[in-house]
Amino acid sequence: MSTSKSKKLTEADLPNTAALTQEVVVNLPLSELHPFPNHPFQVREDDSMKETAESIKQFGVLVPAIVRPVPDGGYEIVAGHRRKHASELAGLEMMPCIVRDMDNDAATIIMVDSNLQRESILPSERAMAYKMKLEAIKHRAGRPSKAEKENAPNVSANFRSDDEIGNSVGISGDTVRNYISLTNLVPELMHMYAAMSPKEPLMPTCGRPLRTSRNSFLRS
């Protein structure tokens, strides 16, 4: 029997769930699993949800959710909101989960990254997700010192956090910035974008392009 100790994960490891081979999966009551605050992705009662619920009825939840303990009791879902709802539809009372202690920024980054690869994301959901991840990345990095600002004469030319987000999902930083600009719309316009199909191209508002260096349209 091996006596070697498990490698302690660093914050840089947290978004990479493939590296979490040492973590233990536990079954937790669905009643103790609570949604992530301001979770931007809707849990829809669509055909995909019905298929997921039927699959869970037959085979169970194959991929554990990622949750973190909350001070008031229970657990906050970081990744697995759709799996929880599908488990409820399937009549289950428990769900396999990986319990992980993490700060708000790390949890936000994992929550966003675990959902961005889905095809059925609305433009409004993607916009809020990019904004939340950008704020988390900036908060983790901290504000640059005065000396750092003085030693960076062309700050706009430096690699930015929104460029980093775009690079991770195969789009430009300009596209990420345009999506984030949607979160500044008045509620009526935001509802209009929320009603759009995930595959429907985004158009600029009020006859003018959204903020971008090339005045290009957003692409989904």
Image (cartoon, rainbow, N blue to C red):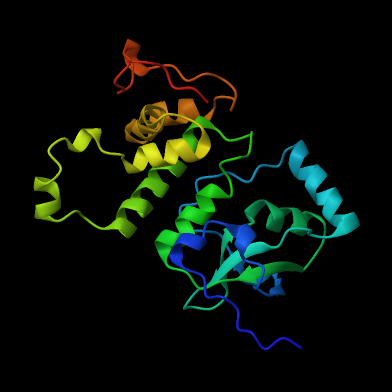
Residue 119 lies, with reference to residue 40, above or below; the image says above
At horizontal 44% and vertical 22% (from top left) the residue drawn is 218
In the image, is 158 to the left or to the right of 7?
left
At horizontal 19% and vertical 38% (from top left) the residue drawn is 155
Tally the numbered discs: 0
Residue 37 shows in this picture: no
At horizontal 32% and vertical 34% (from top left) the residue drawn is 184
In the image, is 114 to the left or to the right of 56?
left
Coordinates of residue 123 in the picture (x, y in percent):
50, 31
Residue 176 shows in this picture: yes
Residue 141 lies, with reference to residue 176, above or below; the image says below
In the image, is 88 to the left or to the right of 181?
right
Coordinates of residue 55 in the picture (x, y in percent):
85, 50
Coordinates of residue 33 in the picture (x, y in percent):
62, 67
Farthest residue to the top: give it. 207
Kindly indicate the quadrant of the structure image that contains residue 131: top left
Coordinates of residue 173 in the picture (x, y in percent):
38, 32
**Foreground residue, 41 or 113?**
113
Residue 203 lies, with reference to residue 186, above or below; the image says above
At horizontal 47% and vertical 20% (from top left) the residue drawn is 202
The quadrant of the rendering that contains the N terminus is bottom right
